Image: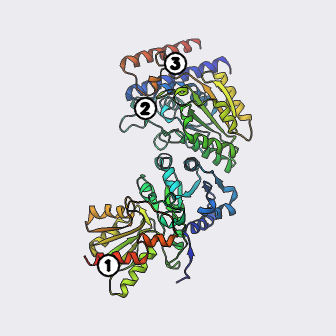
């Protein structure tokens, strides 16, 4: 990937983070930590990887995306707004009564959302269903699902993994956002999931480990996934919870609360400075 | 009147899926290692490329069905009623019901007529669970012909549907030449003005026998077959309440949350009359041959007749 493209993606990802902060501040609730950790991956998916058309969100041949860790929708919403699925101003009414943007993704109400999620473990199964539908119809669209690492404690993730590999769903890529933290503390302390790579390998997956904030890594992983036939791919993306906002990084407290006015101003200033810095390089 | 067909509704459903799939290539069928028992194996044999065994993982199966539905398929996800609606309740609620996806859920081995397998497999809560999901249509057909028609209506209906299937082979009583199925419409099987019996599923034919016996004794009992428990036919219930003044509901289900409660919901708000619920009184079943269990629980013709007589005496 050339530096211009990379810089462009970094700007889009920083804006996605800013959108997540705007949303959770206005909602006085929500999940900024995981929204920030997954922002680079979702930015890459929507701006480099996936075939989607904001003018025709239900296009038959589109690639599908499922945010299985549905609570991290604030940054997904910001990515979708930047892509043109809906207006950026919608972020300000996230989680408000009557608003389009629900606390967890609602496929019936929000353009660009391919599956309603929020209950952990279920999105990855739905993604398997989508990938299976493509196989049934001999269509070449691909299906992407982002999971949390804490989410991998759900048994259903492994039911889905068995199904995906049994049915040779090589059009399915799941990405585990391994930020290492869940509500009750570090994943390793709550109910450890390692060795995650060996688990997915033994379930029949092509496993790729990357730095989930490095666009070269992200690009290489998705390109590799396309070359693998007969098995699904799991990208294990090491990330930082709260990435991009200094006081949120690696802090379990920022899993599920909105920033107050001071925190919002501080986070906004940091992200705006990042965006300005990147734009100055252009 | 055509010959009586003795068939379990699970088998009728499997046959219906085959018929429907010939005309509709969107239909795909999922099962969770019970295809031989739910009878989706009939479909599997004819359309192996459209059948997917998800293994013993019902929650996963429901969400796979949801994903298939988002891509335009009409998935039918089958298991025993206990596991389809009990174990996978939350998956159905959040991944099928909430996004209003076009998934058909088939719950076989419903009720105590599951028999020898006993309490863990005799699902008495499926109707209650599925009724709580907004937008869910809940069907409980009573014989072979009704099941064939209900399966067709379920596939043609856009949106989530739960369809209750039984294990036990039962005699048909509907006449296929005149039978008409309309989603959400009850069917008056027997006119009468002294009292109304409202039944669903396997016990409809038992209630019919009871009502015909009573007719010979000079009693005019109305009998209504409710194949669609949700949305329920309010009009036919209100009319019965007004015209007969007393209702008995009969179902092979816990009296909490099933047909009886659905009827009471209508009656209490529109035309309060006494309603006596015949069903399983908030308890588990146990092992035994199906007909013996039905007899024990008062769900055969003789048990139903006795209750009607008691109510008529009031």
Q: Which residue is mark 1?
A: B309
Which-is-in-front pick, marks 2 and 3?
Answer: 3
Q: Confirm whether circles 2 and 3 share one chain.
A: yes
Q: Which residue is mark 3?
A: A244
Q: Which residue is mark 2?
A: A90
Q: Where does the C terminus of chain A fall, quadrant-wise?
A: top right
Residue A51 seen in the figure: yes
Residue B200, by quadrant, is bottom left
The residue nearer to you, when weighing A145 against B304, is B304
What residue is at 36 percent from the left and 64 percent from the top? B260
Q: Residue furthest front?
A: B287
Please say if B65 is above or below B119: above
In the image, taking residue B143 as reference, residue B214 lies left or right, namely: left
Label 2 lies in what chain?
Answer: A
Mark 2, other Cα within 10 Å: few <14 / some 14–19 / many ≥20: some
Label 3 lies in what chain?
Answer: A
Spatial separation of the CA atoms under disc 3 and disc 1: 76 Å
Mark 3 in CB contact with mark 1 (< 8 angstroms): no
Please say if B9 is above or below B173: above
Q: Where does the N terminus of chain A fall, quadrant-wise?
A: top right
Q: Position of residue A199 (x, y in %)?
A: 65, 34
In the image, taking residue B66 as reference, residue B198 lies left or right, namely: left
Mark 2 in CB contact with mark 3 (< 8 angstroms): no
Q: Position of residue B177 (x, y in %)?
A: 52, 79
Secondary structure beneath dot 1 equals helix
Spatial separation of the CA atoms under disc 2 and disc 1: 64 Å
Spatial separation of the CA atoms under disc 2 and disc 3: 22 Å
In the image, taking residue A173 as reference, residue B152 lies left or right, namely: left
Q: Position of residue A184 (x, y in %)?
A: 46, 28
């Amino acid at each position: 990937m050339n530096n211009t493209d990379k810089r462009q993606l970094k700007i889009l990802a920083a804006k996605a983070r800013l959108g997540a902060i705007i949303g959770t501040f206005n909602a006085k609730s929500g999940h900024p930590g995981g929204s920030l950790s997954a922002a680079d991956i979702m930015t890459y998916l929507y701006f480099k990887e996936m075939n989607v058309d904001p003018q025709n969100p239900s296009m038959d041949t589109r690639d599908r995306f499922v945010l299985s860790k549905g609570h991290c929708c604030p940054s997904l919403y910001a990515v979708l707004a930047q892509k043109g699925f809906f207006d950026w101003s919608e972020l300000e009414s996230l989680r408000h009564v009557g608003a389009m943007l629900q606390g967890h993704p609602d496929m019936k109400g929000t353009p660009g959302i391919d599956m309603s999620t929020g209950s952990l473990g279920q999105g990855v199964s739905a993604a398997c269903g989508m990938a299976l539908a493509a196989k049934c119809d001999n269509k070449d669209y691909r299906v992407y699902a982002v999971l949390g690492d804490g989410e991998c404690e759900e048994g259903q993730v492994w039911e889905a993994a068995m199904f995906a590999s049994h049915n040779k769903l090589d059009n399915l890529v799941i990405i585990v956002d391994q930020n290492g933290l869940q509500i009750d503390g570090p994943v390793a302390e709550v109910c450890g999931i390692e060795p995650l790579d060996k688990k997915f390998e033994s379930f029949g997956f092509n496993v790729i480990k990357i730095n989930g904030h490095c666009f070269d890594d992200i690009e290489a992983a998705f390109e590799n996934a396309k070359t693998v036939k007969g098995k699904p791919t799991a990208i294990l993306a090491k990330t930082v919870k709260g990435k991009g906002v200094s006081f949120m990084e690696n802090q379990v407290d920022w899993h599920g609360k909105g920033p107050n006015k001071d925190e919002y101003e501080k986070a906004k200033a940091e992200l705006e400075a990042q965006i300005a810095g990147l734009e100055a390089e252009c | 009147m055509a010959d009586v067909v003795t068939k379990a509704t699970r088998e009728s459903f499997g046959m219906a899926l085959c018929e429907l799939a010939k005309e509709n290539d969107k239909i795909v069928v999922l099962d969770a290692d019970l295809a031989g028992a739910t009878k989706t194996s009939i479909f599997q044999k004819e359309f192996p490329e459209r059948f997917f065994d998800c293994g013993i993982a019902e929650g996963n199966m429901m969400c796979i069905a949801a994903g298939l539905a988002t891509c335009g398929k009409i998935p039918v996800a089958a298991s025993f009623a206990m596991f389809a609606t009990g174990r996978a309740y939350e998956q159905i609620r959040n991944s099928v019901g909430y996004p209003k996806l076009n998934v058909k859920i088939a719950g076989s081995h419903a009720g105590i007529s599951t028999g020898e397998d006993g309490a863990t497999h005799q699902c008495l809560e499926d109707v209650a669970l599925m009724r709580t999901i907004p937008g869910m249509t809940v069907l409980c057909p009573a014989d072979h012909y009704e099941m064939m028609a209900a399966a067709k209506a379920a596939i043609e209906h856009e949106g989530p549907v739960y369809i209750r299937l039984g294990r036990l082979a039962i005699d048909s009583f509907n006449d296929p030449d005149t039978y008409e199925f309309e989603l959400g419409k009850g069917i008056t099987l027997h006119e009468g003005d002294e009292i109304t019996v409202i039944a669903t599923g396997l016990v409809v034919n038992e209630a019919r026998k009871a009502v015909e016996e009573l007719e010979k004794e000079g009693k005019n009992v109305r009998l209504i077959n409710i194949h669609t428990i949700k949305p329920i036919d309010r009009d036919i219930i209100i009319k019965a309440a007004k015209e007969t003044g007393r209702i008995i509901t009969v179902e092979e289900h816990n009296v909490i949350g099933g047909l009886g409660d659905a009827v009471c919901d209508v009656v209490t708000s529109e035309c309060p009359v006494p309603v006596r619920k015949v069903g399983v009184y908030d308890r588990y079943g146990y092992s035994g041959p199906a007909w013996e269990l039905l007899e024990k629980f008062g769900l055969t013709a003789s048990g139903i007749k006795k209750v009607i007589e008691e109510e008529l005496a009031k």
